[in-house]
Image (cartoon, grey):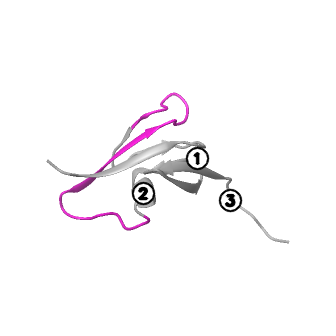
Amino acid sequence: MSEDHGHEKKITIIVNGRKKEVAGKELSYTDIVNLAYDDSPPTGPNIVFAVTYKRGEGNKPEGTLVEGETVKIKEGMIIDVTPTNKS
């Protein structure tokens, strides 16, 4: 008998135009950046990421995310991650 503790249903979201399957009910800013760049995002002292989303969960179906924040996810949510320079 196999134990399946903590197994969560996969949710399909769209990150930078690509389908990604994720588990859980929310993602952090860092999780989303890593999804967008397959765990190897561009780096550098002046690189930051603009994270925007739409078709989100609950009373905040669209918005932006900054480092340190999380967002509740739902099936079909669309997220865009764009590297920008700090200014």
Residue 59 screen position, x and y as percent: 51, 27
Residue 36 screen position, x and y as percent: 42, 57
Badge 2 marks a residue whose secondary structure is: helix
CA–CA distance between discs 3 and 2? Answer: 25 Å
Q: Is residue 50 magenta?
A: yes
Residue located at (49% from left, 32% from top): 61
Q: Residue furthest top?
A: 59
Label of residue 39 in the image: none
| Image: magenta residue range | 38-63
Residue 86 screen position, x and y as percent: 18, 50
CA–CA distance between discs 2 and 1? Answer: 18 Å
Badge 1 marks a residue whose secondary structure is: loop
Q: Nearer the viewer, residue 77 or 26?
A: 77
Asked if residue 59 is positioned above or below residue 31 in the image, the reply reads above
Q: Nearer the viewer, residue 31 or 69?
A: 31
Residue located at (48% from left, 30% from top): 60
Asked if residue 55 is positioned above or below residue 17 in the image, the reply reads above
Crowding around mark 2 (Cα neighbors within 10 Å: few <14, some 14 to 19, many 20+) is many
Crowding around mark 3 (Cα neighbors within 10 Å: few <14, some 14 to 19, many 20+) is few
Give the residue pinned by disc 2: 36
Q: Single out the mark in the foreground, 1 or 3.
A: 1
Q: Earlier in the sequence, mark 3 or mark 2?
A: 3
Q: Tell me the chief SS of the magenta region.
A: loop
**Residue 66 horizontal side relative to residue 61, left or right:** left
Circles 2 and 1: CB distance less than 8 Å? no
Q: Earlier in the sequence, mark 2 or mark 1?
A: 1
Label of residue 6 in the image: 3
Q: Earlier in the sequence, mark 1 or mark 3?
A: 3
Give the residue pinned by disc 1: 25
Residue located at (44% from left, 33% from top): 62
